[in-house]
Amino acid sequence: MKAEHRKELETNKLADKIGGVINSFKEGPSRNATIYGSLVLVAIMLVIIYFWVAANAKAADSARWLKLDSLDSVKSADDFIKENPDTEQARLARLQVARLDLLTGTTNLDSITKSDAIKGLRRAAESYEKLANESASTPLLVQESLLNAAQARETLGEYDRAKQLYERLSRDFPQSLKGKAAADAVKKLDEYSGAILDQLKRLASDTASEPVKLPPLR
């Protein structure tokens, strides 16, 4: 009798469990299960979206590097910069244009294209100053930008601005070669009397298309 009673109890328990499972299917998942399931689904979707965005961003970045390597003119570089603002590749394109402007500006000052040379020098100075302010994470680029901006301003006869840029470079990077060169440039600029500098500034202002150059400082 005891064995039969125990068997009957076990059978009832099994029936109760089976009934509970059936009822749970009829009633649907519990509220907690629904919430947890939704959270898991959202997390999976976010992971998929993240990897999809990352893959597309990486592909776009690679495409920009390839495009940067293929630039063959100032116009194509300018177009590239406009199409890809606030990117590392656009900053490097601006650096390339500034280097070209500085080179052509300084080499054509004594030629019939002097007016274009002046425009190029001003554009180079402005580009380099912007790059110096935007490239804090790349010290070498900051140094090049400050030095070239100062040299461009000096060539244009803008000695006060050139001195400010030299001083910033020598202060922020005192141990670098460019920083030491900038410190020497400041000292040599200081050797000229105020009267001479004032006269040269007035002359440069009166003949804006023909900047006056001081004797070599380096």
Image (tube, rainbow, N blue to C red):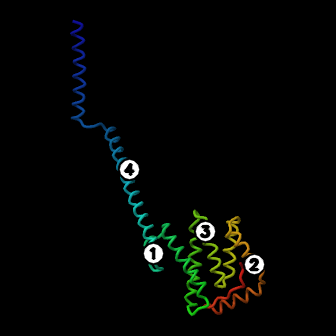
Q: CA distance from mark 1 to mark 3?
A: 23 Å
Q: Mark 2 vs mark 4: which is more N-terminal?
A: 4
Which residue is disc 4 drawn over?
47
Dot 2 falls on a residue whose secondary structure is helix
What residue is at 35 percent from the left and 44 percent from the top?
40
Dot 3 falls on a residue whose secondary structure is helix
Q: CA distance from mark 4 to mark 3?
A: 38 Å
Which residue is disc 3 drawn over?
142
Quadrant of the image for the C terminus? bottom right
Q: Are marks 4 and 3 in contact (CB under 8 Å)?
A: no
**Is residue 12 left or right of 211 when viewed as pictured?**
left
Which residue is disc 1 drawn over?
71
Q: Which of the two residues, 76 or 50, is positioned nearer the viewer here?
A: 76
Which residue type does callout 4 highlight? Val
Where is residue 105? Give x, y as percent: 58, 84
> Is the residue marked by circle 4 packed among few (<14), some (14-19), or many (20+) residues within 10 Å?
few
